[in-house]
Amino acid sequence: MTDSPTLLAGSWRAAADGRWLDVLNPADQREVVGRVPALSAAEIAEAYDAAETAARVWRSTGALERGAILSKAAQILRERRDAIATDLVREMGKTLAEATGEVAKTADFFEYYGALARTPQEYGLADARPDTTVSVRREPVGIVVAITPWNDPLLTPARKLAPALAAGNAVLLKPATETPLVSLHLARALVDAGLPPGTLSVITGRGQDVSAALLGDRRLAAVTFTGSNDVGRTIAATLRPGVRLQTELGGKNATVVLGDADLDLALATVCAAAFGQAGQRCTATSRLILDRPIAAEFIDRLRTAVAALRLGPGLDPATTMGPVVSRGQQKTVLDHIGAAVAAGARLVHGGNAPTAEPLAHGCYVEPTLLADVTPAMAIWRDEVFGPVLAIVEVDGFDAACAALNDSAFGLSASLFTRSLAAAHRFLDRADTGQVAVNLPTSGWDVHHPFGGFRESGSAFKEQGVEGLAFYTRVKTCALRFA
Ligand code: NAD
């Protein structure tokens, strides 16, 4: 176990009062993987002081040089891929293959926004007045707070940091309490790439403990938050008027399989999207809507596929599904399953935590299939965020769309069909920010705009060119030159 100082106001620091937070291994709760400082309000104020100065320096650094630093950070992340992926597995629990993919995609974010810094950010407009030009510019908003969850602890900070920094802002990153270590790898890559001191601070500490100092500072311009709806609501209620807020919240993503679908493709895709990363992806498939004529066969084949998943520690090459992130999350997931069975759902597979050694020391939940679910059940409506798939049967396309959209969430949806008409209609009718046909609910690339509708998100998309809008404000400039 090592102590990991955090990046605070331009230097690597322990907390002044010597308080540390343990990071536990989800695959074996007896192992403390590392410790990070629990920062105080005074230290967060220091991060703001440094960010205030750094934001001016970074903004005037120029887009090309900012882009070059982000591109260099991408290269450094790729060089350090194996070490970072190993730490990611040890603090979060996902498999090494999943973690390695996450490092690669994180590097892609910095490469993409590093290059995007070269694209035009300004355009000219006509003006009726003599000898006058008008230009429309985008400028950074100033100091951004980025608050991120534990499920993709490298990728989600990168999704926010890359556009925020490309646009010229300073950032205070608050990583999840369970998984702060890889965000320090990310900070180190940026510092080594040449990011000016103070432009980024990593605010380690428990959410509730740092919240007032982090969100109450008058210098705060914008908050980008990914996490639960409850915390999202708390943050929205805390911010003073005028502070911009972007939220990426919960999901209850559905896949529809129609009777005419390629069932082999649908089966492999649903299995991977529901149980990849132990179901802890915001875009994981957690609801399955089956056309009645193929339902019994599909559930049977799905049970066989799920039974073949191999539960174990993420660093074991034989593992195909790791643990969930913590004991708390394990209990939450098991409680959801218990309540669903009590409400009348049929347990087709899984449903328990393994009790044999050595898995009993980890936060494992068996991959779980629940059939005979009805739309009234909590398992159909509430986010579980674990390896649990709830299944309903419907009669045809219209009933499938109605079941899909009967949700407070609107993050991602997918359909399996061979009908061109059904495919087009589905893209139109799905009330979700991401929608796919013959593809998983997950798997969106760094240049694809990303974000949910209704209770899953906010007006600002992340990723792609759209992702820059949140981190910039528009200035309209008129100039009479004679
Ligand atoms: P969470 O809401 O508990 O925590 C998210 C972050 O907020 C953490 O860094 C936490 O420390 C911090 N936090 C907690 N209380 C705070 C407060 N009062 N003030 C400021 N910060 C505070 O979420 P989680 O359990 O870490 O992550 C799982 C959730 O994230 C799920 O609901 C999942 O759907 C959601 N998620 C959404 C997306 C998306 O893009 N829509 C992506 C990934 C995860």
Image (cartoon, grey):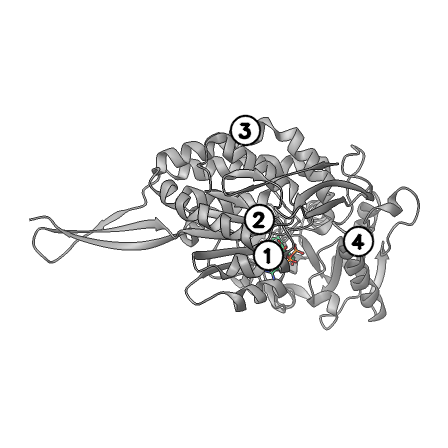
Q: CA distance from mark 1 to mark 2?
A: 8 Å
Task: Residue type at mark 2: give it.
Answer: Ile
- Ligand 1's quadrant: bottom right
Give the residue drawn at x 81%, y 67%.
339
Which x, y percent locates residue 348? Answer: 85, 57
- Would you say residue 418 is visible in this rendering? yes
> Label 1 belongs to which residue?
210
Lower position in the chain sequence, tag 3 or tag 2: 3
Foreground tag (3 vs 1): 1
> Label 4 belongs to which residue?
327
Q: CA distance from mark 1 to mark 4?
A: 23 Å
Query: Which residue is at the front of the view, 233 or 277?
Result: 233
Lower position in the chain sequence, tag 4 or tag 3: 3
Q: Secondary structure at mark 4?
A: helix
| Label 4 packing within 10 angstroms: few (<14), some (14-19), many (20+) | some
Looking at the image, residue 271 lies above or below residue 433: above
Task: Residue type at mark 4: give it.
Answer: Arg
> Label 3 belongs to which residue?
76
Give the residue drawn at x 42%, y 42%.
166
Ligand 1: does it lie within 8 Å of the C-beta at label 1?
yes
Lower position in the chain sequence, tag 3 or tag 1: 3
* Most distant residue in the right direction: 356
Lower position in the chain sequence, tag 2 or tag 4: 2
